[in-house]
Image: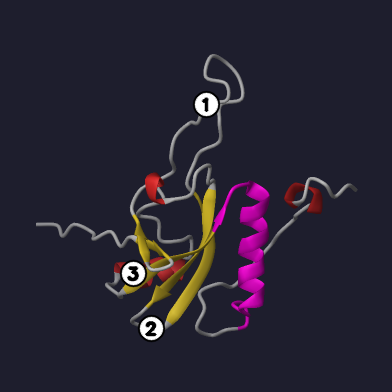
Amino acid sequence: MAVKKQIINWTYDGKEIKSLEDAPKNVLGFIYRITNETKGMTYIGRKSMMKPNYTSGKNKGQSKGEYPWKSYTGSSVALNADLKAGDIYSKEIIRWCFTKAELTYYETQNIMCSNALLDDNSYNFWVKTLIYAKHLNPAKKE
């Protein structure tokens, strides 16, 4: 008999986030930290909760729905291998984001400011980004 994988819920400020109703209105996604409690290692990333809106047709402007964010455990192959092996872990939302630019900026900021790329206890091993200031601050012109 196969053992069903237990879903570890996301937390934000100590509160469990189980559905979109637990998140701020109009949120696109979040910046997160997954901690492998067994090994004392961390991974910082971003996750979109909502798919983009339809851009044409009869459903134009309507949402295409949710991404599978509740059970998401990051894109790190090493982290997911450790979790599959049974390591104990926790999932924390660091920041809510409302645009793609915010997701990109704050993920990069958290990886860089935490020195994740230099930390042997981090699963992060690369970061690449292209961000325009005007996408974060519409008042700022080129």
Circle 1 SS class? loop
From the viewer's perspective, is residue 87 above or below residue 120? above
Circle 2 SS class? loop
Name the one closer to the observer, 62 or 40.
62
Q: Residues within 10 Å of mark 1 (few under 14, many from 20)?
A: few
Residue 24 in sight: yes
Q: Which mark is residue 62?
A: 1
Of discs 1 and 3, which sits in the foreground? 1
Q: Going 90% across and 48% down the picture, which residue do you hit?
A: 142
Q: Residues within 10 Å of mark 2 (few under 14, many from 20)?
A: few
Location of residue 5 (image quadrant): bottom left
Q: Amino acid at mark 3?
A: Leu
Q: How many marks?
A: 3
The answer to whether the residues at label 1 and label 3 have Cβ atoms under 8 Å apart is: no
C-alpha gap between disc 1 and disc 3:
36 Å
The residues colored magenta run 96-118
**Residue 58 shown in magenta:** no
Of discs 1 and 2, which sits in the foreground? 1
**Residue 99 shown in magenta:** yes
C-alpha gap between disc 3 and disc 2:
11 Å
Q: Earlier in the sequence, mark 1 or mark 3?
A: 1
From the viewer's perspective, is residue 20 above or below residue 62? below
Q: Earlier in the sequence, mark 3 or mark 2?
A: 2
Q: Is residue 39 left or right of residue 123?
A: left
Name the one closer to the observer, 68 or 123.
68
> As drawn, which residue projects farthest toward the right?
142
Q: Position of residue 13 (x, y in %)?
A: 43, 67
Q: Amino acid at mark 2?
A: Lys
Q: Position of residue 107 (x, y in %)?
A: 61, 63
Q: Amino acid at mark 1?
A: Gln
Q: Please say which color scheme the image uses.
A: secondary structure
Residue 126 in sight: no
